[in-house]
């Protein structure tokens, strides 16, 4: 199941009806909605509409536009329905009865479970649309460069890990000393390797990785693309049957041994993985792209907001979402 992007739009439970070009009005909007003995206090349907339009209208309008477009672009599927079920059921599990659940979602503006499901479905489709947009930005050169520079075959490897066991209660001096001690032991382990001792023997003596030290630091066979950047880059530089220098990683100080490396897979075998990785990297580096993608999708369908106020609200909303931090 795809990782979900958090797209921030609010579902507002307001009925919007478009009318004339510059200032949308409700049919029979001048009819009295609430009457008083003093008729000057009466509230018309249009009074309510204008109030709701100013406070909630643009959020609902964006939801309505996206729902119409995305229901046309992306058909409902088992994947989407499964996601919606998971989201709804995870909320339901917090409540003993359906009534408690209903009261909870009512407090957040959802009339019933079906309306909540529609909202989850909308955001999932938005997520898919954003992914499509991000992937459309990826060039063949980006794919080729990633393949040439970052894709490797599966590796069989071992490591020696000296953890830096600091705690929040330590003083800065104690933390520094603990880190220096770990580095000193890692350097000692590296020196023993250089003197010809077997990697597995040194790992058993020095490594404090409980998962691997008893078997000589063996990590088994793995795909380096699943590793953190520092570890992956370390394995990229090591020749088969060689070990690395002492490298500081998020886990401590490590020495890596590359025991074997398989031939890298063909581009077509990993192209989907590369595209998804580049897509996620683009979004991580520029969160505004998700809003840009949805904005361009609406523009593709040639939308035009007839109400001048709502049009200004829309432009302001998109500008705020897409402005530089």
Image (tube, rainbow, N blue to C red):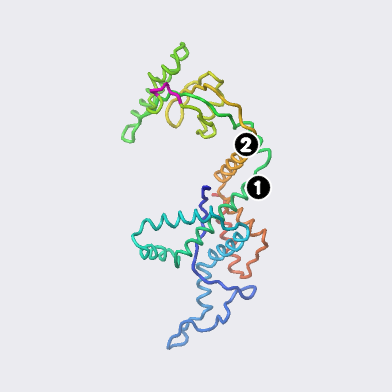
- Locate residue 180 relative to residue 303 in the image: left or right: left
Does 110 appear above or below 254? below
Query: Does 192 sit above or below residue 81?
Result: above
Q: Position of residue 231 (x, y in %)?
A: 50, 29
Instruction: Give the secondary structure at mark 1.
Output: helix
Q: Residue furthest front?
A: 78
Residue at the image position 53 percent from the left and 65 percent from the top = 60
Residue 16 located left or right of residue 161: right
What crowding class fits label 2: few (fewer than 14 Cα within 10 Å), some (14-19), or many (20 or more)? few
Is mark 2 in CB contact (under 8 Å) with mark 1? no
Front residue of 283 and 267: 267
Q: Is residue 38 located in the magenta-colored stretch of the structure?
A: no
User: What residue is shown at x 38% (from left), y 56% (from top)?
Assistant: 93
Report which residue position mark 1 lands on.
136
Which label was assigned to residue 269?
2
Which of discs 2 and 1 lies nearer the camera? The answer is 2
Residue 260 falls in image quadrant: top right
Which segment is the magenta one?
213-218
Query: Which secondary structure, mark 2?
Result: helix
2 or 1: tag closer to the N-terminus: 1
The crowding category of the residue bearing disc 1, from other C-alpha atoms within 10 Å (few below 14, some 14 to 19, many at least 20), is few
Residue 273 image position (x, y, % from top left): 59, 39
């Amino acid at each position: 199941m795809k990782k979900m992007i958090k797209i921030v739009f609010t579902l507002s439970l307001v009925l919007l009806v478009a009318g004339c070009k510059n200032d949308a009005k409700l049919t029979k909007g001048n009819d009295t909605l609430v009457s008083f003995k003093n008729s000057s206090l009466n509230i018309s349907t249009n009074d309510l509409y204008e109030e709701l339009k100013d406070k909630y209208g643009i959020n609902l309008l964006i939801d309505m536009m996206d729902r119409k477009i995305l229901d046309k672009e992306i058909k409902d599927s088992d994947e989407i329905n499964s996601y919606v079920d998971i989201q709804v059921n995870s909320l339901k599990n917090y409540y003993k009865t359906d009534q408690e659940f209903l009261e909870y979602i009512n407090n957040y503006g959802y009339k019933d479970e079906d309306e909540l499901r529609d909202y989850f479905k909308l955001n999932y489709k938005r997520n898919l649309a954003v992914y499509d947009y991000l992937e459309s930005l990826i060039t063949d050169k980006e794919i080729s460069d990633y393949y040439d520079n970052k894709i490797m075959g599966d590796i069989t490897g071992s490591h020696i890990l000296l953890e830096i066991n600091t705690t929040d209660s330590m003083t800065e001096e104690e933390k520094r000393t603990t880190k220096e001690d770990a580095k000193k032991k890692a350097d000692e382990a590296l020196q023993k390797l250089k003197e010809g001792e077997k990697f597995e023997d040194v790992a058993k003596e020095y490594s404090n990785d409980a998962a691997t030290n008893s078997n000589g630091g063996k990590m088994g066979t793995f795909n380096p693309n699943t590793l953190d950047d520092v570890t992956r880059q370390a394995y990229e530089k090591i020749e088969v049957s060689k070990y690395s220098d002492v490298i500081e990683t998020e886990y401590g100080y490590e020495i890596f041994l590359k025991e074997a490396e398989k031939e890298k897979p063909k581009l077509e075998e990993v192209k989907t993985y590369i595209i998804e990785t580049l897509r996620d990297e683009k979004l991580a580096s520029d969160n505004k792209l998700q809003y840009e993608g949805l904005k361009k999708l609406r523009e593709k369908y040639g939308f035009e907001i007839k109400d001048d106020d709502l049009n200004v609200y829309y432009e302001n909303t998109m500008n705020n979402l897409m402005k530089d931090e």
